[in-house]
Image (cartoon, grey):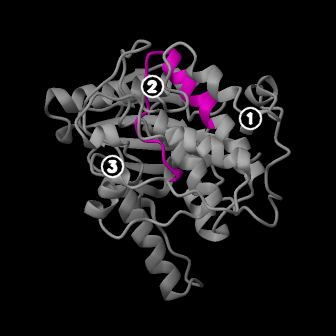
Amino acid sequence: PLLPHNCTVDKTEDADTAVSHIKKMSDIKAVVDGIDGIKLSQGLALGLSDFDLIRVIGRGSYAKVLLVRLKKNEQVYAMKVVKKELVHDDEDIDWVQTEKHVFEQASTNPFLVGLHSCFQTESRLFLVIEYVNGGDLMFHMQRQRKLPEEHARFYAAEMCIALNFLHEKGIIYRDLKLDNVLLDHEGHIKLTDYGMCKEGIRPGDTTSTFCGTPNYIAPEILEGEDYGERMMAGRSPFDIITDNPDMNTEEYLFQVILEKPIRIPRSLSVKAASVLKGFLNKDPKERLGCQVQTGYTDIKSHTFFRSIDWDQVRAGRLNNYTYNHTSTIFFFI
């Protein structure tokens, strides 16, 4: 593994490169320091010694994420490392268990980041998950400002398939935003980050926990009412095709969500404007996709999606809306 005590610096390296290399190794050591060996494995009989640790690629309040390489086949993965000392009450334990279970469920869907393996030591939990190297939609929106409607339609269709898959498993996602929508090497989306998921939700059930990202919170959440999550399915396509700016303050943002009418840019087609108005309807009873028995069918049959072959999308065969990978999307290795 690329650990600091194994670190050597070629004399031909310049000082900046050497400092950067040592810092990267120190970041990795901070994540895995103190681990003597694997105490328990689940799924595949793997442990930390089976992986080369490349670099830290993400940090959160509960966990860090490493880019790793499985030695036996050179396959690259992301490894989420959670310190057990930070998981100390029932709510935290439920969060970890739910996230692990959702990763397991997601492994059978092409538009969700799935679990490869997991293991633990006395001090840490390790989730080895798919590494998706095309960047997230927020990154691409920041570069492109807005995308053509046909791209938004394609991505939105894959998002809806992913969310419906979770709903059929009794899971609501609750954190759909551009940052959590990754692109793979073929231009298909994969949802990631299941930290806000809730399990055990049957058709027609709602929940009441105040959570989510401010720009994507539905009015009924702000008002303290029970909710589903269909409104978030509309916000991401809205951001993609409108270059929708963030609000200046959270207070003003919440005021807009609760009180202001949705302003649809005149540049959008009639079909795009219609589907966005449906998804962003402030009344959940009238919102597109919120009907208990027909919500998913209502979305698929909307005129905006009429050109979509849903069976082809579900099978991953439809990718004629993706970018030219060599000139438009920068892939990260």
Secondary element under disc 3, as helix, strand or loop, is: helix
Q: Residues at badges 1 and 3 in contact (C-beta under 8 Å)?
A: no
Q: Is residue 33 left or right of residue 267?
A: left
> Amino acid type of disc 1?
Thr
Using the numbered discs, state the Cα–Cα distance from disc 3 to disc 2 in whole angstroms: 31 Å
Using the numbered discs, state the Cα–Cα distance from disc 2 to disc 1 in whole angstroms: 32 Å
Q: Is residue 173 magenta?
A: yes
| Labelled disc at residue 258 | 3
Q: Which one is nearer the viewer's eye here, 228 or 277?
A: 277
The residue positioned 72% from the left and 49% from the top of the image is: 270
The residue positioned 83% from the left and 32% from the top of the image is: 317
> Amino acid type of disc 2?
Val
Above-or-below relation of 265 to 204: below
Mark whose residue sits in front, 2 or 1: 1
| Labelled disc at residue 102 | 2
The residue positioned 82% from the left and 28% from the top of the image is: 309
User: Looking at the image, is mark 3 or mark 2 earlier in the sequence?
Assistant: 2
Q: Is residue 171 magenta?
A: yes
Q: Is residue 123 left or right of residue 168?
A: left
Q: Which one is nearer the viewer's eye here, 184 or 256?
A: 256
Residue tagged 1:
303
Q: Residues at badges 2 and 1 in contact (C-beta under 8 Å)?
A: no
Q: How many marks?
A: 3
- In this picture, which residue range is highlighted in magenta? 159-178
| Labelled disc at residue 85 | none
